[in-house]
Amino acid sequence: LEGPKQPVDQDRFLAMGGARSKLEGTWDTTPVPIKDIKNEEELYFDMSRKSRFQQYQVRRLHGVFRRACALGKKQDVITSHAFCQFFSNPQADRQGEPANTRGRRNSRVSDKSLNGEAGHGDGEGEKKKPKRSRAGLFFRGFAFSESLKLEVFVRTMDKILNGDRAEKVGFLINCLDPRKSGKISKEKVETMIGPLSGSLAMIFSKNPPINSANGPEGEEDATPSSAYCATEKFRVWAMAEDSELDIQRVLKPFDLLPTVEMEKAEIKRLFDSAEFKVGSTWFVLSQRWWQAWKEYTSYDKKGSTSNGLAKNNNSAKVVDGKEGKGKETGKRRRLRPISIENADLAGGTLPGELKQGLVEGVDYSLVPKSVWVKLVEWYGGGPEYPRKTIELGKTKLRRVEVFPLVIHVFLVDSKTGETESGKEFAQLLSSQTPIAAIHMLAKKHFQINPQLPTRLWVSQSDGDTRRLTGKNPKRSRGSPEGQEAPETTEGESQKAPGDPVETPDSPGDGDSEGNTVSIGDCDIIEGDILLIEKSDQKNSKGGSPWPLDRISATHKDWRKLQVGDVLDARDKKGVWYRAKIVARSEEKKNVRVAFDGWDSRYDEWISIEDESKFAAPGHHSRKSRGKTDNDTERRAPTSRGVSGLSNLGNTCFMNSTLQCLSNTPIFNTFFSGGRYQQDVNKVNPLGTRGKLAHAFGSLLQQIWSGNSSVVTPSSFKRAIGHHAPRFSGYQQQDSQELLAYLLDGLHEDLNRVKKKRMTNTIEAKGRPDHIVAEESWQTYQLRNRSVIVDLFMGQLKSTVVCPNTKCGQVSVTFDPFMYLSVPFPRRTTRKLLISVVHIAPRAPASYVITVEASGHFDHVIQALSEACDVPAKLLVVGEVYKHKIFRILGEETTMSSVTLRDIIVAYEMPAPQETRDPNTPVLEVPLLHTRKIVSPEGEGYSLATPQGLPLMIEITDETTHKQVHQLIARALKPFLPKELTEGWFPVIRIVDKSASHLKDEGPMLLDSKKTQIRPGDNLLLVWKELDVLQHYHHATNIQKWTQVGNAETAGIGVHDCIEQFCKKETLSKEDAWYCSKCKDFQQATKKLDLYRCPEILIVHLKRFIQRSSAYREKINHFVDFPIKGLNLSQWVVAGSGDSDAIYDLYAVSNHMGGIHGGHYTAYARNHVTNRWYLFDDSRTREVNINNVKSSAAYVLYYRRRH
């Protein structure tokens, strides 16, 4: 019943044979035989072939049909009485009645009333025809008998929902004149449409009496002429272009499947009503599918309305991206997306786990729960990825937690104190999950008696282990040397390293489960492991009932550090392991430690005075954990400093920045050598009391120790996430934003100014630049003096001129800067590569066209038309994805939705024949290719994998099977061998857009029958001759096609960007400057110049720009920058003393991908070997200096030449 990862809904349950025991009763959950379900599926395929519905839509209609049948206590037909109950429209029939009574009277209308038979009189014995209800009139449009079958129901709904205006008006006339009498009564029209007015009222006035032998009683009708009108006269009025008839409103009760405008309006309403509050649920949706849906509905089109379809439109027809009857220039139909496809987002092994590295706006979008439910109701598909909105830190920053933590929980053996083999489980949990909830979850999973006391521990990825008591969640974890000791909380005493922390235990449990402390509060990150231990009085032997406590007591003599002692030891990298002392030095000041599971070459000599390196056995390590860190982490790097950084989950942005800073001259030795510790400022309220500096220093010490080729920066990730909540979690971030925070945070932690004075902004007021600049710099250093200021800080001259001619005030200030964020020179055009499949004998080719960077795709189609010399109306442009045409790029497609990585193919269509009606709608049908079809689930299922480049043909409703064969042969001819053996032609099957279901009864024959291809269908060409298919693959390799035009863009250099940064500009209204002389905000002119150049110059290329409040764009242009000899003299103020500032590049932070993120790497020059290396998370390799320049360069790091 569920299908592929889809929840059971009522419609699907009923459609598969379920039924209700009563109208408002419970579900009848009697299992439906598999055979019956397959019969239902065959029925859906058959119905979809005979209608314009897709199979999932037929399934939904069948569910509705079943519910209506149940009202009449029938299984396979809808009675007229049940129909009235189900489709009555209380808002139209019972205006003014209480809501709880509306519809009841209609539902009680007798079948006799519906049939037009006499009902009860008015109390005086005379019989009158009762007024028919709207539902009763509608029923006559479906069936003239007393029951309605499924096939008739679906066929009629096809006219109502998919038909053009003529079909809908025809249905309405069938309702008003079911006996084909040639006349329509005024009473019925008022019941169906409402009070007569305007032109409708006029057609019922001054009519001659209508005589008919086919009246209700078979007699001549001499009713007054104003009570009736001729059926054809009503049809002409209804079909007129200026008709007042709103056919969509009249047929509103049958809006069981939404139209394009209904979908767009409903989704907009749901988005507007969604609340972004803590605890609200949002769903991850494939960006590719979401973009296809927006293209289908023109969701992003400005000025689009939600008032329903135009009166005279065919609702299934879309012309030139708009709904309407259309002209000759392209009667295109927008293709409705197939079911939601989120499978590409899946990653990992746990249900609901996403692939790492996904980027919002590129790979996925977030939609509210209400939107997701509605989309699934309309389209089906999945899988679903619900995510909660959380609140981070003291700043109360709200965000959707797209990447929850993967938490592993182990059970500690009561006898050995080690983790039991196979006793573990993993769970996907939010960082806001209470520790108490995890505790209860672990108890339930390991089937621990709820009354049995238990304790929960966290074994961190850096080797440290601590209790989770809920009383001091943010205790120090693995503090490096020089860092202050953890604070003691109430009920806890500060123990020597290695002893478990003792805390008062609540009755019945070792850790109180009543607290609300969460995973995030305890600084638990991915890679940490939770341990749960049970109280065991049986094996306590009079001692502690806790296994880990008994281990500590058993090894109480470990502090003597004798040869043969087993204990936990921390290596040079800072990671804890089970270890054994194998030797002592002659002076007995050092011991040689062998780490469990590692070769003797990794043994280390450790001073016995360094107590931070030793702990009781089992406290920090576990036997089963063994080599949690990869073997490569124990191998020495190729050179000191060339160590990769483990990706902790979308932390490539952090790793890229850390590698650049790690290779910053002077700066790296300042931290790796421990010199930073003497500058730690523990009283600065703007800092972290040295915690960030200690975490950064410890990390650089590990990187430059020369012991590990890969380092896990979990402690640093934890520290920066704790003090800057926006960098916690595992969503992709911006490396430059992290750099800005990190340098500022390190500056405050290492600020040598303990007490800051109040200072004022220094204005020039006509004084010489050198005096004002020096005064400003000295004033700045009254509050800021650190290694960050010494190395990274420069000074800018800012000149602001008031535009008021009567004022003319000039303000000159000198401001410090830590980095230069330089914009790109403005460009209004972009280049696109489009491959065109021409009509034979013209060979296919690829064209590079220059078009406007914004707007819609209409100017792209026109430019392509001029480039390839093909009329625009004969070009159909599509995006190819996974060997299928994913979407048609029409005139309304926005340029922002087309990325550089999209494969765009245009198909030249043959000119229409002169004999064809120019208003005949045409349908573009993609041609997919495959080697074979696998049908493991029987007829109707297709598991074909499309291959090669898809092609396209155009057909009409009059196209025959034979003509389809001819069109396909003509499309294939340019790409096949000249000499073909007999029987080469592929088998033709009709499939849905995803090529996952067959929609025909068998291969298409070479006959004169009209094709049954519907909008959204594809033709699948099943090739029998493998060599022919291989030849086709080779011929359709678009990378080998002739390219017309130059894809390279005009070069941009970093000099151009700096020039743009220093260029005079007029401030916007939002950034208006307050003129102290005018006493008002002014749109002044502003110019920036360099005055004091820093030792380390960081240049941030502003690739991400905000086009609007809801739209960001990334600039992917290549920027040329010098590796040696960046001369800033032309932008430095003359006479500043820094006019000879020349810089050499030493590191680059790269960004690959699109908007909002992607993947980050780094290039850096190692000062030990003087060679360049690529740092890609944990992977490192030496590279040629010429590889450093690329279009991915994002942040450039330069050192001043001396």
Image (cartoon, grey):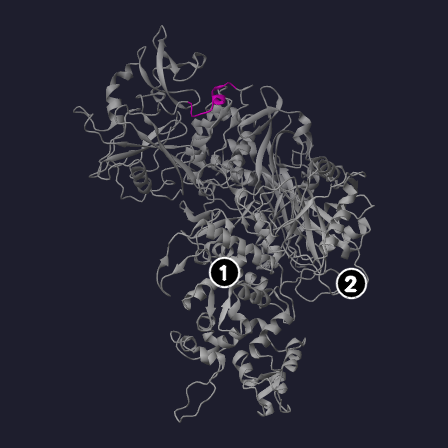
Residue 723 position by quadrant? top left
**According to the image, label 1 marks what residue?**
62
**Residue at coordinates 53% horizontally, 59% vertically from top-left?**
267
Q: State whether residue 25 is above or below residue 533.
A: below
**Neighbour tally class for label 1: few under 14, some 14-19, many 20 plus, Cα within 10 Å:** many
Q: Earlier in the sequence, mark 2 or mark 1?
A: 1
Whether residue 1056 is visible: yes
Q: State whether residue 411 is above or below residue 72.
A: above
Q: Is residue 1006 left or right of residue 606?
A: right
Residue 815 position by quadrant? top right
Q: Position of residue 559 (x, y in %)?
A: 28, 17
Residue 634 magenta-highlighted: yes
Q: Position of residue 413 (x, y in %)?
A: 29, 27
Which amino acid, by three-letter code, is at mark 2?
Arg
Which residue is situated farthest in the bottom direction here? Answer: 124
Q: Secondary structure at mark 2?
A: loop
Q: Main secondary structure of the magenta part?
A: loop
**Residue at coordinates 44% horizontally, 29% vertically from top-left?**
679
Q: Position of residue 632 (x, y in %)?
A: 50, 22
Q: Position of residue 185 (x, y in %)?
A: 57, 84
Residue range highlighted in magenta: 627-636
**Residue at coordinates 35% horizontally, 63% vertically from top-left?**
25
Which disc, if any, is residue 911? Answer: none
Can you say which quadrant of the picture contains the C terminus? Answer: top right
Which residue is situated farthest in the left direction here? Answer: 542
Q: Secondary structure at mark 1?
A: helix
**According to the image, label 2 marks what residue?**
916
Nearest the camera: 1188 or 838? 838
